[in-house]
Amino acid sequence: MSIATMPRTLRLGDLEVATPVVLAPMAGVTNAAFRQLCAEQGAGLYVCEMITSRGLVQGDKTSLAMLTFAPNETFRSVQLYGVDPETIGRAVQILCADHGVDHVDLNFGCPVPKVTRKGGGAALPWKDVLLGEILTKAVAAAAPYGVPVTMKTRKGIDEDHLTYLDAGRIAEDTGCAAIALHGRTAVQHYSGRADWESIAELKSSVGIPVLGNGDIWEAADAIRMVEETGCDGVVVGRGCLGRPWLFRDLAAAFAGETVVGLPRLGEVAAVMRRHAELLAGIMGEERGCIEFRKHIAWYLKGFSAGKDVRSRLGMVSSFADLDDLLGRLDPDEPYPVGELGTPRGRQGTPKKVSVPDGWLDSRSISAPLDPIAEDATSGG
């Protein structure tokens, strides 16, 4: 694929995103503050942290509190998790009617045990009829509002239980606007390398847009993924941890422009301060600074910031302390180029996937799923 044929925008139904880039939902990370920070850097679709459909339908305060959107979010995008078609349908209707959501994504990629052991997340596509019922209800609920519904999935539970091609067919048949594929199985979690060939295979088998996910650490990786797979856009997760300017680089790359040079430590410190400020705007100064602590190691990864400063930043609880410590960093220290193209965030090792008893014996549902068991966690 040449630069002339590279996708410049992403169309999901009637929604057109200026850059074919989607921020993957990550629990405890992609709140409104982080999404605003990313949106300040570049264009894209920024998806809210995953919300359980049952929590939304039951009016759970925690679920409703997550439905907070930044003023610069062009489109309100939410990812839902659930296992019950009726509940998901009602949740989608609530999102569209009561919260002005512009896009709904359904999570069928999460590999976390507390989700898969109840038949949710990456385990659910194995039950292909159930998957179709869920997508049908979601699309029908969103249709009166003109809201596109998409789904995210993985290759399958493991190499012996692959589901991504069936999922693509079902997504297309039920009217989904797109399907995103993380090129790993649930067993892999975040270990090893993502299989981009599976993304290419899915793209060649469906007529709806396909988004590729997995191992996009730099803007060049996104361009290479599109060139190699023919996918219509990319989903970025761990690659932007401590690097929200990745969206600036991605916007430039897809526009055929020169990617801006790497930030020096002083510029990184300014972004860190802005991130803490945005968190404080939602939670208050002390809580916002405490919440910011989890991001510090990601921002400073590879820099030679002293152990004492790093340690004290990990205990910061006020802007005064944060400003003092950031002021001790060398603003002229160049970006650690050795970190480019390397994994960020969790990696781990392959793990056995917890699924309900007898789940893999048949692709039909042999016992009712327990929708009460829905629980929010990070997207896959």
Image (cartoon, helix red, strand yellow):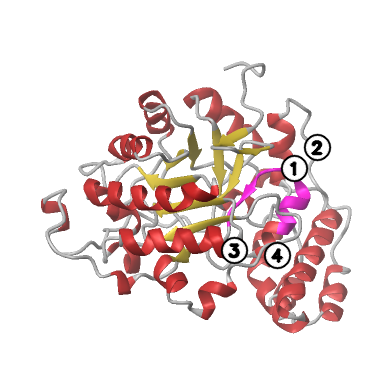
Which tag is nearer the camera, tag 2 or tag 4? 4
In magenta stretch: residue 14? no
Q: Which amino acid does label 4 sit on?
A: Ala
Mark 2 element type: loop
Which tag is nearer the camera, tag 3 or tag 2? 3
Distance, label 1 to label 4, CA atoms, is 17 Å
Looking at the picture, tell me which residue is in the foreground, 281 or 290.
Answer: 281
Q: Mark 1 points at which residue?
A: 248
Mark 4 element type: helix
Q: What residue type is labelled 3?
A: His
Residue 193 is at least partly visible in this image: no
| 112 vs 46: above or below | below
Q: Name the residue under label 4.
A: 33
Counting residues from the N terminus, which is met first, the one under dot 3 or under dot 2? 3
| 285 vs 292: above or below | below
Q: Name the residue under label 3.
A: 99
Tell me if mark 3 has few (under 14), some (14-19) or many (20+) residues whose alpha carbon lies within 10 angstroms of its own: few
Which tag is nearer the camera, tag 4 or tag 3? 3
Tell me if mark 1 has few (under 14), some (14-19) or many (20+) residues whose alpha carbon lies within 10 angstroms of its own: many
In magenta stretch: residue 37? yes
Q: Name the residue under label 2.
A: 260
Residue 69 is at least partly visible in this image: yes
**Residue 69 coordinates in the image, percent (x, y):** 67, 63
Q: What residue type is labelled 1?
A: Arg
Q: In which quarter of the image is the N terminus?
A: top right
Counting residues from the N terminus, which is met first, the one under dot 1 or under dot 4? 4
Distance, label 2 to label 4, CA atoms, is 23 Å
**Residue 2 coordinates in the image, percent (x, y):** 62, 16
Magenta residues, start to end: 36-47
The structure residue drawn at horizontal position 55% and vertical position 73%, both measured from the top left corner, is: 64
- In which quadrant of the rendered view does residue 173 lie? top left
